[in-house]
């Protein structure tokens, strides 16, 4: 620090120098304490234990401004301590009272502290002149408190503002009293009208304040921390402990307990196709169409007049919806379909495509990947430009940084073997995680003497050098560009797992032909690669060498941070359904299990005017209850029965934990081509909750149920006296993903 040296003779000039140094250093250090160097963090102002802007007129906190009780045209200011932006510290031990407020009705004024000093105690100098001997505080507390109009305050110079700390804004307000009017003063000690009002002095640790997370900054979260910034252990985040891999949390925006938003889409008759051979749907003669989005759940399908209640089914993980050939649909008519959809990372529905453009995060949706919440998708377009002309299956995923990636990962792009020669080559991309290498040979000439060998060098998980040679021989077979399938014989795999890769070299090239080419991939996947274990899977694709020719939506979506899974009631559904056989000997043809806490067969509404005792024809459920509350109402959509020719026997319903006010209604659509009347609970036969189908015409095409009152779920079994037509795949009937049982 600057100072005088004592051995030197002291003079007035030297003493003045030392005094000025002390003043400058004290003020400078004070300003550094409250970070005057950063205007965004500058914390000069009122010394208080809590935010001064939260003060109320009745408080006794520092510098509270209140209307004087004896003279309501004036205000009082309580004592306190303040630190000014100049670095000056002002302690006021006594308040200022009965300060007049200028102006008439509507006038806004500012009460503020203004730092000043006075030179006092004159003494006689050696030159016989009077000079003040010291600088001191002003004579009274009220001398530091000023009141001026807001307009005048806003014109203060920067030099004056450096000496200023606003305490309150006062408004003169007119009040009707009896037959006349009076005025009153309204004191505002907040910062909504005067944003610089009542600043709060605090020491500022710049380094500490700079440590910020990825969350939203607020007064309650000064470090902007989010769950992304908080680890559960030294190795795992909270999300990694809760989830096996990434997922999308899509809140039930439209319907309670169903993820996503409700979509209504009109399918034009020209877009509805007939699956003549059953090659698309697994049911010959089914009517099928594509929706504009990937449904998270199908809710309803009906005609334009909203009269017919079709039984829609969806091919899992696709946007293909279909109706059975014996449903009510009349060819040539449009179909209105209702479904829920989730925007986050939704794949495109129209193929083929050379690149995939995914949707961004939607409202009330959260993306979790790599154990972190991904706030934004960085690039919604994912290119396949490095995939080369080799048909292959890929899984597209979103990583924790918001980028779409895929595996197998391309390590070295498509290159002709003749161009590679027999020289050492570098890989184009590093590996993401540990895995085997997958090498593709393309455009070679198949033959008994074919021999293409490649030596690959890298490192193992312990860091040691790892070298392996892979070869293509007469067993190789090519897969032409445009083939929408992967041919295993076109690839070879390393037996070793590489953690890193260094280089490769072609060691043999015999009779491969002039166009033979190599492409290198890392066969990394979440099953055995730590770096991918927590990613968000998005889409399964097939690349035909030119474009993506096939795609499935594999996003895990739920309303809460739990991965979607088979209903918790499915395990009980199997033995209960099998028990049904003891009552009606024959074939258990289909059974379904519904979970009213996570419903799968829900409908928005339906049309039926034939029965007067039905409740409202739309679903009404609350999400704060497990299952159905006693005042809840569940409307199931019409459920398609697997095609069959055997005779119907019965439909048996087994409610799970029914309780107060439980009731239900059911109906079916059979070979007569019409719906049955709704059967109420009182009309069911023994064993309880059973509809006798002895009068029904084969086949039963679909059924529907309404449940009202407390219940956790519903197990439904359909029994016939003979087998049905085998289905070629599992669609969304039966016990969730467990299929249809006979």
Image (spheres, rainbow, N blue to C red):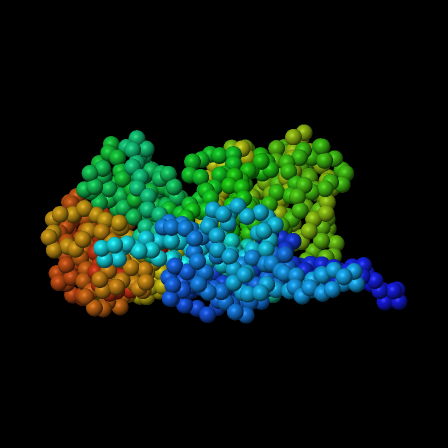
Q: Which quadrant is the C terminus positioned in?
A: bottom left
Q: Residue at x 69, y 48 (%)?
A: 501
**Residue 244, visible in the rendered structure:** no
The front one of 678 and 716 is 678
Q: Residue at x 35, y 47 (%)?
A: 261
The front one of 280 and 181 is 181
**Residue 374, visible in the rendered structure:** yes
Q: Is residue 709 left or right of residue 24?
A: left
Q: Position of residue 444 (x, y in %)?
A: 63, 34
The image shows residue 387, relative to residue 236, as above or below, that is above
In the figure, residue 505 lies in which quadrant?
top right
Q: Position of residue 533 (x, y in %)?
A: 55, 56
Q: Which quadrant is the N terminus positioned in?
A: bottom right
Q: Position of residue 502 (x, y in %)?
A: 72, 47
Q: Is residue 10 left or right of residue 639?
A: right
Q: Position of residue 729 (x, y in %)?
A: 37, 48
Q: Residue at x 18, y 55 (%)?
A: 666
Q: Residue furthest front?
A: 128
The front one of 358 and 116 is 116
Q: Residue furthest top?
A: 514
The image shows residue 266, relative to residue 540, as above or below, that is above
């Amino acid at each position: 620090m600057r100072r005088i040296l004592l051995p030197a003779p002291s003079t007035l000039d030297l003493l003045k120098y030392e005094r000025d140094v002390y003043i400058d250093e004290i003020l400078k250090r004070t300003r550094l304490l409250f970070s005057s160097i950063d205007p965004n963090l500058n914390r000069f102002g009122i010394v208080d234990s809590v935010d001064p802007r939260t003060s109320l007129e009745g408080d006794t906190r520092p510098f509270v401004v209140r209307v004087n009780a004896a003279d309501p045209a004036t205000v009082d200011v309580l004592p306190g301590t303040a630190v000014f932006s100049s670095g000056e510290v002002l302690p006021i031990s006594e308040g200022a009272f009965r300060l007049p407020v200028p102006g008439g009705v509507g006038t806004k004024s500012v009460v503020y502290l203004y730092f000043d000093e006075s030179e006092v105690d004159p003494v006689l100098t050696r030159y016989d002149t009077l000079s003040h001997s010291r600088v001191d505080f002003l004579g009274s507390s009220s001398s530091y408190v000023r009141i001026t109009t807001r307009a005048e305050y806003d014109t203060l110079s920067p030099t004056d503002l450096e000496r200023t700390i606003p305490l309150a804004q006062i408004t003169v307000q007119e009040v009707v009293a009896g037959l006349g009017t009076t005025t009153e003063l309204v004191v505002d000690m907040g910062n909504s009208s005067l944003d610089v009002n009542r600043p709060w002095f605090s020491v500022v640790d710049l380094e500490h304040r700079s440590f910020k997370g990825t969350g939203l900054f607020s007064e309650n979260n000064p470090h902007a921390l989010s769950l992304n910034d908080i680890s559960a252990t030294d190795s795992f985040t909270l999300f990694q402990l809760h989830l096996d891999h990434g997922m999308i949390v899509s809140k039930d925006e439209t319907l309670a307990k169903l993820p996503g938003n409700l979509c209504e889409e009109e399918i034009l008759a020209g877009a509805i196709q007939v699956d003549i051979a059953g090659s698309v749907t697994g049911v010959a003669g089914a009517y099928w169409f594509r929706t504009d989005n990937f449904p998270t759940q199908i809710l309803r399908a009906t005609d334009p007049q909203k009269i017919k209640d079709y039984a829609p089914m969806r091919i899992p993980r696709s946007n293909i919806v279909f109706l059975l050939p014996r449903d009510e649909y009349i060819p040539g008519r449009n179909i209105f379909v209702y479904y829920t959809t989730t925007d986050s990372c939704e794949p495109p529905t129209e193929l083929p495509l050379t690149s995939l453009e995914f949707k961004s995060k939607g409202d009330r949706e959260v993306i979790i990947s790599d154990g972190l919440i991904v706030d934004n998708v960085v690039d919604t377009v994912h290119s396949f430009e490095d995939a080369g002309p080799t048909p292959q299956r890929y899984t597209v995923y979103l990583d924790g940084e918001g980028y779409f990636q895929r595996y197998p990962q391309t390590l070295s792009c498509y290159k002709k073997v003749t161009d590679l020669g027999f020289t050492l080559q570098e890989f184009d991309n590093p590996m993401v995680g540990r895995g085997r290498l997958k090498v593709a040979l393309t455009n070679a000439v198949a033959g008994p003497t074919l021999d293409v060998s490649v030596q690959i060098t890298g490192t193992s998980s312990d860091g040691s050098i790892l070298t392996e040679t892979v070869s293509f021989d007469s067993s190789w077979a090519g897969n032409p560009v445009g083939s929408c399938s992967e041919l295993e014989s076109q690839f070879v795999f390393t037996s070793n797992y590489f953690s890193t890769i260094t280089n490769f070299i072609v060691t043999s090239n015999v009779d491969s032909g002039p166009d033979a080419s190599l492409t290198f991939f890392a066969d990394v996947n979440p099953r055995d690669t730590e770096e991918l274990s927590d990613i968000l899977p998005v889409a399964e694709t097939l690349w035909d060498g030119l474009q993506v020719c096939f795609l499935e939506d594999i996003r895990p979506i739920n309303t809460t941070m739990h991965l979607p899974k088979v209903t918790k009631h499915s395990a009980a559904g199997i033995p209960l359904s099998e028990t049904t056989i003891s009552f009606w000997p024959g074939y258990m043809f289909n059974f379904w299990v519904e979970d009213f806490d996570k419903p799968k067969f829900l409908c928005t509404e339906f049309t039926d005017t034939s029965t007067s005792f039905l409740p409202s024809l739309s679903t009404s459920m609350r999400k704060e209850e497990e299952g159905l509350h006693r005042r809840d109402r569940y409307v199931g959509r019409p459920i398609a029965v697997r095609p069959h020719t055997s005779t119907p026997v019965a439909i048996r319903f087994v409610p799970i934990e029914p309780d107060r006010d439980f009731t239900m209604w059911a109906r079916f659509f059979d070979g007569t081509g019409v719906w049955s009347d709704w059967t109420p609970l009182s009309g069911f036969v023994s064993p309880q909750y059973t509809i006798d189908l002895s009068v029904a015409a084969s086949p039963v095409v679909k059924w529907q149920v309404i449940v009202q009152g407390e219940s956790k779920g519903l197990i439904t079994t359909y029994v016939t006296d003979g087998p049905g037509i085998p289905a070629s795949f599992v669609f969304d009937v039966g016990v969730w993903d467990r299929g249809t049982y006979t």
